[in-house]
Image (cartoon, helix red, strand yellow):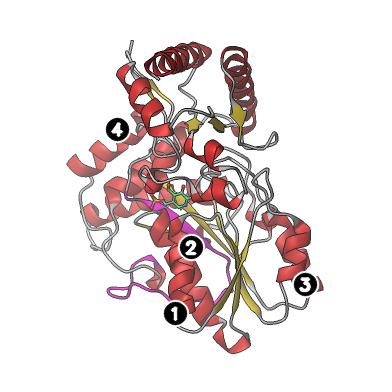
Amino acid sequence: MEDFVYLDNSSTTAPCKTAIKYINEALTTDWGNPSSLHSFGFNAERRITAARKAAAKMIGAREDEIYFTSCGTEGDNLAIISAARANKRKGNKIVTSSVEHPAVLNTVKRLCEEGFEAVYLKPDKSGKITKEQLTEAIDGKTILVSLMLVNNETGAIMPVSEIKAVAKLNNSPCLIHTDCVQAFGKMPIDVNRLGVDLLTVSGHKIHGPKGIGFQYIKKGVNIKPIITGGGQEKGMRSGTESVPLISGLFGAIEELPDIKTQLEKMRELRDYTQKRLAEELPIAVNSPEDALPYILNISLPGYRSETLLHFLEAQGVYVSSGSACAKGKGSFVLNEMGLCRERIDSALRISFSRYNTKDDAEKLVSALKSAADKLRKAN
Ligand code: PLP
């Protein structure tokens, strides 16, 4: 029995057994260079092929539409920079949201310094972007729309599947990208139903290793690589493939439980946690009701997030105050949602994995209650 409760799974997850096993095998036995024309190379290549097949199946794509990258951040960069450059002659407008991960926001910002123009859609109070906002923003000059499928701080699900029809109606030549880092492996994803051209995934949010991800690039979408070199990944991402990390990602995908069944379990756990917290503490809920249940963002007005975090950690309970990237700064996502300062400063993001139980929820409730009691007495 582990004596801690880890509820910060949107930051990263513990690598699962199969991921660790496959990484070990790739490091100890199949350590060849996949480009080598002998059995060491062949065995390494076989591992990559198996991983590519599994990744493609997860999102309803073809194997030749999957490109391994070093992480979600690299995938977002590849998709956004390459798509903007490829479509440059058709216009210069990029539509995105103001609550994307910095991997998207800072990449779009860089493109704006090169002359592109960006429109940032602001979420409503529940954290969501609407189809109407997309309809208003996407026009004939829009060459790229980048919208995350699930927000990493609130779990809000964004209307990615509406973009294609809106773009068609508004005569936009745009390519459609979605950052699926928080959604992959947690909700059913089908690239055709989503209608996207580019989709980004990271391995370490689904119990795989850090430093690996993959990019879906729809067949026929003609974009150029950012990293050039020996021509690996069909020239889209040069550099000798990290067979151990790709194998680890494969292990994580193999070990994923049935997505719909697990989603139901997470919904039950999230609802239970929310109900128990509300019974014991005056919380405000910042996640929308129909959020992906892997993330529950709450506030405990009157208490500072960082102080609560430290009290929780002292009791072996790990959550976060916002995204790992915010590192203690107030959440810009909650700010964009128009929440008041008190709600933002007291926010906690509780993020679940399949390893969490109702017992973990009870430990969280009792640790948070005791933190609030102590802090109230100290004031
Ligand atoms: N996009 C989202 C929505 C994320 O939550 C993260 C990581 O937190 C990333 C991108 C970046 O992924 P990586 O850590 O693999 O670079």
Quadrant of res 334: top right
Numbered circle sitting on residue 113: 1
Tag 2 or tag 4, which sits nearer the N-term?
A: 4
| Helix, strand or loop for the magenta stretch, by majority | loop
Q: Secondary structure at mark 1?
A: helix
Q: Is residue 335 above or below residue 108?
A: above
- Residue 106: x, y in percent? 43, 65
Instruction: Name the residue that disc number 4 marks.
Output: 21
Is label 2 in contact with label 3 (beta carbons under 8 Å)? no
Is label 3 in contact with label 1 (beta carbons under 8 Å)? no
Distance of label 4 from label 2 (alpha carbons) = 36 Å
Tag 4 or tag 3, which sits nearer the N-term?
A: 4
Instruction: Name the residue that disc number 2 marks.
Output: 105
Pointer 2 residue Cβ closer than 8 Å to ligand 1: no
Q: Is residue 2 above or below residue 115?
A: above
Image point (28%, 73%), residue name: 230
Q: Is residue 148 left or right of residue 34?
A: right
Residue 220 part of the magenta segment: yes
Is label 1 in contact with label 4 (beta carbons under 8 Å)? no
Tag 4 or tag 1, which sits nearer the N-term?
A: 4
Could you tell me the amino acid type at mark 2? Leu
Distance of label 3 from label 4 (alpha carbons) = 46 Å
In terms of depth relative to the viewer, which is nearer, 235 or 170?
A: 170
Could you tell me the amino acid type at mark 3? Lys
Quadrant of res 74: bottom left
